[in-house]
Amino acid sequence: MRRFWLTVAAVVLLAPVAHGQNVSAPLPVNSIPLPAIVQKASNSSSGSVSSLVKAFPNNNVAGNSIVVVCGVGNGTAPTISDTPANAYKQAAQVANGTAFNVAVFVATNIAAGANSVTVNNGGTTASIAMEIYEVSGLITTSTTAALDSTSTNISGAATTSPAVTAAPLLPNELSFVAFGLGTAAQTITVAAPYANATAPPNQLPTDLLVPVKLWERPARSPASGGDDFVEMADLSDHGGLPSRPQGATLGVWEWRADGLYFLGATQDTQVRIRYQKTYPDLADATSNVLIRNAQEAIAYLAAAMASMARGSPLAEKWDQAGDDALEDLIVRATQREQQAVRRRRPYSSRRGYVWL
């Protein structure tokens, strides 16, 4: 005999600060704050109650946000309060008749200090379950600004949950889902392809040594085709970034203190980068060596380090052999480069400076 359960579900997408608040000074790409869950806690009642309380394990940080995900065993929306009296906004709420309802609440720019969050039952006493999250990196100008999109759905009688769809408008958004199941305690899992294996944007490549060129275009859905990438001007050796208001595009960039700096833009942009990369580490015997004919130099110097670690008198001999092999490698590479054809750089008193 198949069992059918009532279900409700709500999903909320929260926007990161990097896409909703302008900054007064240029920020490097690798310093843009990404949203992150700082701490979390959960609680559930053992029976019908009028309210349920849960404290954060650590003090809240001023300016962060709090997300409350809760479910109540009646059809009336609950309310949220906490110790420092932060203002909570109901981001999403859905009820399946009078059986139960789920909701997600958000408070931004919260006060610092110890905090206990209370879910207040809006109707008759009933069972309550709650999860609380402290989140950093969200838009703090207002709770409304931090909310990107929400969606809810219910199912009257089904063996699987209802689908809930919310399309993120910005990269790096956080998604919070409230799910209620009208039966005994069950394990709930999120089915594929929810998992996003795409590398997070707004981060420099880990193997970046120095950038060479950057291009940009407005960030749009791949289905719309998108615009062509336009090359950006490198001002690293030309006085650095100017002092001017943000425009629709980035336009210029500067490489400084191992970071890419921009003036910022009033719309989301995609950036493509060409850069010189570092060679990967040699982690084990299967690691690729990306330097041709480097076997001798690596072998001799590895033997020298092993001998030195064991106090062997051969350490100096292997070290010298490694230095010689490395010198031969450099000489051969230099000779190959000397035979390569080089285009004359376009500098002259008449032409002036020309971008390469």
Image (cartoon, rainbow, N blue to C red):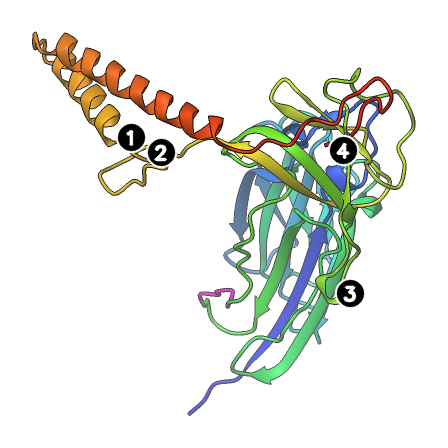
SS type, badge 4: loop
Which of the two discs, 1 and 3, labels the residue nearer the N terminus?
A: 3
Judged from this view, the residue extending furthest toward the left is 313
The residue labelled by disc 3 is 224
Residue 6 on image: x %, y %:
59, 78
Q: Earlier in the sequence, mark 2 or mark 4?
A: 4
Relative placement, left or right, of 349 versus 6 is right
| Stretch of the chain drawn in magenta | 187-191
Classify 10 Å Cα crowding around label 1: few (below 14), some (14-19), many (20 and above). Answer: some
Instruction: Estimate how packed mark 2 is, as few (under 14), some (14 to 19) or many (20 or more) residues with alpha carbons within 10 Å.
Output: few
Q: Look at mark 4 in the image and give the residue it sits on.
A: 109
Please check the rendered image and state whether residue 246 is part of the magenta-colored stretch, yes or no: no
> Circle 3 sits in a helix, a strand or a loop, which is it?
helix
| Number of numbered discs overlaid on the protein picture | 4
The answer to whether the residues at label 1 and label 2 have Cβ atoms under 8 Å apart is yes
Q: Amino acid at mark 3?
A: Ser
Q: Amino acid at mark 1?
A: Ala
- Residue in the picture at 73% in, 42% down: 215
User: 274 or 133: nearer the eye?
Assistant: 274
Q: Which residue is mark 2?
A: 291
Q: CA distance from mark 2 to mark 4?
A: 51 Å
On the question of residue 138 being in view, the answer is: no
Dot 4 crowding, Cα within 10 Å, few <14, some 14–19, many 20+: many
- Above or below, 32 against 309 in this view is below
Estimate how packed mark 3 is, as few (under 14), some (14 to 19) or many (20 or more) residues with alpha carbons within 10 Å: few
Q: Quadrant of residue 281?
A: top left
Mark whose residue sits in front, 4 or 3: 3
